[in-house]
Amino acid sequence: MLSRVVLSAAATAAPSLKNAAFLGPGVLQATRTFHTGQPHLVPVPPLPEYGGKVRYGLIPEEFFQFLYPKTGPYVLGTGLILYALSKEIYVISAETFTALSVLGVMVYGIKKYGPFVADFADKLNEQKLAQLEEAKQASIQHIQNAIDTEKSQQALVQKRHYLFDVQRNNIAMALEVTYRERLYRVYKEVKNRLDYHISVQNMMRRKEQEHMINWVEKHVVQSISTQQEKETIAKCIADLKLLAKKAQAQPVM
Amino acid sequence: MNENLFASFIPPTILGLPAAVLIILFPPLLIPTSKYLINNRLITTQQWLIKLTSKQMMTMHNTKGRTWSLMLVSLIIFIATTNLLGLLPHSFTPTTQLSMNLAMAIPLWAGAVIMGFRSKIKNALAHFLPQGTPTPLIPMLVIIETISLLIQPMALAVRLTANITAGHLLMHLIGSATLAMSTINLPSTLIIFTILILLTILEIAVALIQAYVFTLLVSLYLHDNT
């Protein structure tokens, strides 16, 4: 960082070096050994699933394989232990028995409860995986349901023309009905007007008739003089008497 | 004999440099972290255990108390692993040193108490007088409660030190008893060896329990003061 400051200071001091200042940091970092390769985005090589094999929980298997061509590893181990004991490099003290008891208890515990703990840990991991799997399956199911719904919708769309035909028929019928209704109304209106004219004519004729009759009656009554009236009345009375006699005679037959 | 008995409690030095620092820094190496969801069995069980203890411990606190959760969970894990590692032969247990336990207990206790006095001074002072005391006893009781408060960090540290140290000493003594009897009378050696095995089981339990007790008490002090 300080060298970058130096470079920028040099750039301000000598303007001809300003273009060189762009190269400065690159030159600097080319001397570093970090990040020289391409960055690993994907795929990082997968982790091994199981650890290396060990014997007796401590000594890796490779150690035994390494020794087998040369010497037996158990013989080597026994020899080393006996050498350490006999030369009192390892002193048997109170600590030895403590170590024996602690290691004995540990080995007993591991042998007895080891598989249980291992299964428990596996079960925990499986639960996590099952949760994620569940989420994935639920998502897939959801999408599948959407696809099925879409398909059924498409099938329905194929049958849509029935609906349209029915609707078209309905509308044609409704149009027909309105047309006829309107036709009937027109007919009624025209008839109304014609009836009006007819009734006006009838009324006029009746009125003329009545007027004529009244006029004729009035003139006839006017034309009858008093002499004629008296003669007519006497003749009517004589006729009536005659008729009365005739009428009385009839039922005897 | 005396030299040998307490030799395991001397903080080890390598050419005059304290190796005790390295020993104290060792347990975190046994608790790997992982950025993956699915891990190996070790990490899975450890994560499950830590989740269990943290949930168990921190449910009784309010939000302010839960800010201490990292501190308390790392405390219990540190004390548990250090105690258990100390059971291995020829190892050094840092928690047998009173200096270290005081260094753990005093800041935690003082932090809890000072936090309580800063925020809720009335509640903090109310702890000095239990409810329902008859009036003439009050002055004496306040003094007794004050002493009981001030002795808490010492009690924390000394409890842990004494328990672990006593356990280690007992193991050593009975081990040397078996060593001595092994040349004299073999069947009694076996009896004493059985006692040693039982003691080892007890020590494992004590190691875990002491961690739990320490952390529980600190969390109790925290609960009182939040």
Image (cartoon, grey):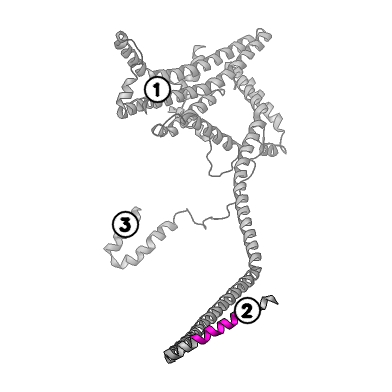
Name the amino acid type tagged 2.
Ala
Residue A224 in view here: no
- Residue at image position (55%, 22%) is B87
- Relative image position of residue B71 (x, y in whole percent): 43, 32
Q: CA distance from mark 3 to mark 1?
A: 51 Å
**Height in image: A219 above or below B167?**
below
Q: Secondary structure at mark 3?
A: helix
Left or right of A78? Residue A28 is left
Task: For label 2, count other residues whose C-alpha is less than 10 Å away and answer few (under 14), some (14-19) or many (20+).
Answer: few
Which residue is disc 2 drawn over? A247
Residue A6: where, in percent of width, then height? Answer: 31, 57
Q: Position of residue A107 (x, y in %)?
A: 65, 25
Q: Amino acid at mark 1?
A: Leu
Q: Total of numbered circles in the picture?
A: 3
Considering the image in quadrants, where does the C terminus of chain A appear?
bottom right
Residue on which disc 1 sits: B102
- Camera-nearest residue between B180 and A185: A185
The amino acid on which the numbered mark 3 sits, given as a three-letter code, is Val
